[in-house]
């Protein structure tokens, strides 16, 4: 029962993390509240269309360093991304810049550290994780493979799902990379609109590769 509870907690981190990425769309002559993590900004807009355009994002060359001595982690993140700490089950989350006022979804990377009360191997954790994912409706597992994180054996799971956004369903894509060390699970979760997943993957991979357990 304890293992199942832990897995549900970890999976919810990835799913709830979506809420920090969603933004409401502006409507004609109304005031729209845009939620960026936990920061609220009011924007007046006269836009009447819900059609969004995709703007090519230039590669980010400047990175800042985030470090938490309390949790013993360090990683780099783009200087033009928004950093929000202690949000929706994550220790910290990083969100991509808005591409336009009609950008309703900001892709991001969340970092969580969870204590494990009972010893668990990476294989055991992965099996329970996959079992739990298969029970979530509209979830399709695309990839489940071994990898490394912070120089330790790790596992990567890529899967898709759906969310309600502006009264319609939107396809989203997740990548979770996690490792276990000293009875702690370190989880990095990338969430993006499915159609933009590849666009930000290079930047996300740089962030994941820079992750350290210190």
Image: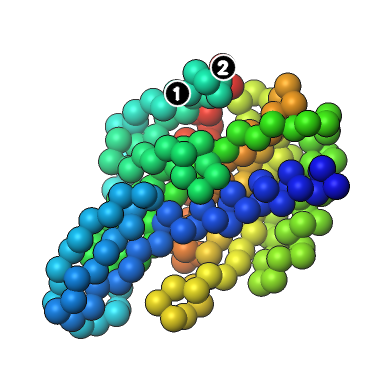
> Is residue 119 shown left or right of residue 95?
right
Q: Secondary structure at mark 1?
A: strand
Residue 46 placement (x, y as % from top left):
14, 77
| 102 vs 56, nearest the viewer | 102
Q: Which residue is mark 2?
A: 214
Query: In the image, which disc is placed on residue 67?
Result: 1
Q: Are the residues flagged by discs 2 and 1 in contact, CB closer than 8 Å? A: yes
The mark nearer the N terminus, 2 or 1, is: 1
Q: Is residue 147 visible?
A: no
Residue 36 in view here: yes
CA neighbours of label 2 inside 10 A, class few (<14), some (14 to 19), many (20+): few
Q: Residue 12, image x and y in percent?
A: 63, 53
Q: SS class of the residue under badge 2?
A: loop
**On screen, residue 149 above or below 42:** above
| In-front residue for pair 149/87 | 87
Q: How many marks?
A: 2
Callout 1 crowding tier (Cα within 10 Å): few <14, some 14–19, many ≥20: some
Task: Identify the residue at horizontal 83%, vertical 29% (top origin).
Answer: 119
Instruction: Please give the name of the residue rendered at 39% of the width and 41% of the height, measured from the top-left corner.
Output: 84
User: Which label was assigned to residue 205?
Assistant: none
Residue 200, given in percent of the width and then of the height, sits at 43, 51
Of residue 94 and residue 210, the one placed in the foreground of this image is 94
| Residue 107 locus on image (x, y percent) | 42, 54
Q: Name which residue lies at 73% across and 21% down.
A: 182
Q: Residue at x 71, y 40 (%)?
A: 155
Quote the CA–CA distance across marks 2 and 1.
9 Å
* Left or right: residue 82 compared with residue 76: left
Q: Is residue 93 left or right of residue 139?
A: left
Q: Quadrant of residue 143?
A: bottom right
């Amino acid at each position: 029962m304890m293992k199942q509870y832990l897995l549900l907690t970890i999976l919810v981190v990835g799913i709830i993390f979506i809420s920090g990425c969603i933004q409401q769309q502006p409507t004609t002559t109304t005031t729209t509240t845009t939620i960026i993590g936990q920061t609220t900004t009011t924007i007046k807009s006269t836009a009447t269309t819900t059609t969004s355009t995709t703007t090519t994002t230039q590669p980010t060359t400047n990175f800042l360093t985030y470090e938490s001595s309390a949790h013993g982690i360090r990683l780099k993140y783009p200087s033009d991304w928004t950093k929000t700490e202690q949000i929706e089950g994550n220790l910290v989350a990083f969100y991509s810049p808005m591409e336009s006022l009609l950008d309703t979804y900001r892709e991001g990377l969340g970092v969580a550290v969870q204590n494990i009360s009972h010893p668990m191997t990476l294989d055991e954790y992965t099996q329970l994780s996959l079992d739990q994912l298969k029970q979530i409706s509209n979830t399709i597992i695309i990839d489940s493979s071994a990898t490394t994180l912070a120089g330790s054996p790790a596992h990567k799971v890529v899967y898709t799902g759906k969310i309600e956004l502006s009264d319609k369903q939107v396809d989203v894509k997740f990548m979770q990379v996690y490792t276990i060390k000293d009875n702690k699970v370190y989880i990095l979760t990338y969430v993006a609109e499915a159609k933009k997943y590849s666009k930000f993957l290079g930047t996300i991979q740089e962030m994941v590769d820079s992750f350290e357990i210190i």
